[in-house]
Image (cartoon, coloured by chain):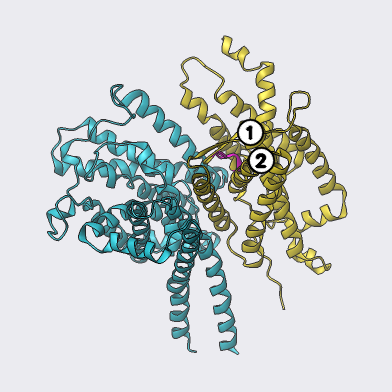
Chain colours: A cyan, B yellow
Amino acid sequence: MDKNREELLFGFLVNGLAPLIAILVSFGVGGIIISFLGADPVAFFVKMVDLTFGSWRGVSQTLYRATPYFFTAMALSFAFKAGLFNIGAEGQMFIGGLALAWVGFTFPGLPAPILFPLCLLAGFLGGAFWGAIPGYLKVKRGAHEVITTIMMNFIAIALVQYLVQNHFTNPDWGIPHTPVVGKGAWAPSLSTFLPFFPSGARVNVIFLLAVFMAILTVVLLSRTKLGYEIRATGLSPDAAEYAGIDIANRTVMTMAISGGFAGLATANFILGPGSHYFLKSEYGNIGFSGIAVGLLGRNNPLGVILAAALFGFLEHGGLGVQLFFPDVPRQIVEIMQAVVLIILVVVLELVRRYVSRLRKRGST
Amino acid sequence: MDWLADLFTVSILLATIRMAVPIALAALGGLFSESTGVINIALEGMILMGAFVGTIITNATGSPALGLLTAIGSGLGMGAIHALACVTFKANHIISGVALNLFATGVTFFLALVITGGSQISVHHSLPKIGGFSPVVYGTALLFLLSGVFLYRTKLGLRLRATGEHMEAVDSVGISVTKMRYLAVLISGGLAGLGGGYLAIEQANFFTKGMSAGRGFIGLASMIFGKWTPWGAAGAASLFGFAQSIQFRLEIPFVPDEFIQMFPYLITILVLVGAVGRARPPAEDGNHFIKEG
């Protein structure tokens, strides 16, 4: 098999087939668990598809739920391009989200063209700051970013809790949350431009922002000097350094951009149709599940969009289907997400072995 | 300055010892695994799984001893998966660890919900205390002593450590790198599982979702701070145990509760930032062994 077709096959197997197999296996495992719980797995999944893609309202909800996963997944995937493990999406998401909300409720009078981008910028910078710290610690002191980012998660949770509870919330409210962000920052629902979405649709322009940032990232990584240097640092730090790249600077910058992505994850909830305030308990799984989404999307921004859509499907479908199948807890979705990840890790390795065997046979 | 005196009371000392146990066991587990060069990020998930399995079995059988044994077993199981992924399938150690953590978090939460309908399960029995401490505390001290002897004074211990330093050399004398790594990772899982079982059955007397609360990672930090030695890890784990014991007991003026909660995690970062410059991990940490020819 000639070189080009070989590369195409390799690419297809690793980036297309492996995630597909992992997804199918996870559905299989989910199906087994569902039948153990006494429900019919086929009916269960059919209902899920119906709820998510059977109506424009369903599609809206699916994309709405998918959007934050894109951002936290990109946090992991972007860092991965430089060979870094950013497990801190959770903390970066909280800090960015609080920063975003703070700008929104501190300057509520500002007009939309100023407030909206300002909030997004604050979210990005908040997450970037939180991500840059472990990056800096790694560069300066060799502290492994896996542990430092995880520690920063816990610190962020405590910090955000403190700030919201003691400085931002109103004692009259039941659950502590921030004040509502100014109207200028409210992200319009997609139903305003795309009439096939029902008027109450929650999917909003932040989803478009996600798609835009995916494309931007692909361009950045493949066509700019910064992108090249980041990828070089990831592929071989020594070679990159030898070539004159400032790997310390690129490492911190990568962690900052990566954190910035995560910082925007809650924009969907805070600025989009809904409560318009920051409520910590609403953002449960998104930080860590972003890891699974990133890996499933093969760390490629466009793949991540697809993987995020899948997770949106699982989440919205899983939520809605509970009404019809009361015996199956919503957490089955989390199980499936976790299974997908483990199977993917194994399948990727198997595919890699298969391909290297193919290659050896081809070159003799 | 009363609060300063409050920091050094007997009750905090006792709490320190109790809180240090899961962290110390995780640290010892990490140590075994890394002695052969396998990074075990999954300690966190192994603790959680041990806590959950231990809780369920203890309540089901009425025997905390059996609960602890199954907790160890669940840790061994997770260790087996991690070893399979990292050693046999040569997956990236960190990705495998993260995947296992996610898996444990999801599965334990899910099963807790399915079995009891809530996310918190009380444990109804625990082992009789000796001298005010659970027997596991003494067991942990013993395990540390035995580990020190095992790793530094026995042939097998030497072989494990050699695997972590130079896989080629070990392979060339006919020792199976695979077997060494599997053994180490299994022990690692078992220890973490025990830590989790202790956490739920003996210390907290309940299981709740995410109750490992970073102890697996703090254990890793202890291992690093302790320069990859059992006695160092024990000392570091005690320090973190102290940080955790003052978390909910202390009222330092001007310092809000939430900031005190951050202590263990802040200290972990400080340790990682300060200590790594002075100590080095086993040379083969994270590397895969690929047999030539």
Residue A2 shown left or right of residue B93 in the figure: left
Q: Are marks 1 and 2 on the same chain?
A: yes
User: What whole-number distance in Å separates the C-alpha atoms at marks 1 and 2?
Assistant: 8 Å
Classify A255 as above or below A357. Answer: above
Depicted A348 relative to depicted A172: above or below: below
Which secondary structure, mark 1? loop
Closest to the observer: B287 or B131? B131
Given contact means CB atoms under 8 Å apart, are the residues at marks 1 and 2 in contact?
A: yes
Q: Where is the N terminus of chain B found, in terms of image quarters? A: top right
Is residue A245 visible to us here? no
Chain containing mark 1: B
Q: Amino acid at mark 1?
A: His
- Residue A19: horizontal and vertical position, in percent? 45, 68
Q: Earlier in the sequence, mark 1 or mark 2?
A: 2
Mark 2, chain letter? B
Is residue B170 found left or right of A271 in the rendered image? Answer: right
Decide: few, some or many residues near mark 2? Use Cα within 10 Å; few <14, some 14-19, many ≥20.
many
- Which segment did they paint magenta? B211-216
The residue to which callout 1 is attached is B124
Along the viewing direction, whichever of B64 and A313 lies nearer the viewer: B64
The answer to whether residue A76 is seen in the rendering is: yes
Quadrant location, the C terminus of chain B:
bottom right
For badge 2, the amino acid type reads Thr
> Which residue is the site of mark 2?
B58
Q: Residue at x 12, y 59 (%)?
A: A195
Total labels: the figure holds: 2
Q: Position of residue A328 (x, y in %)?
A: 43, 53
| Residue plotted at (47% across, 50% down) | A86
Secondary structure found at label 2 = helix
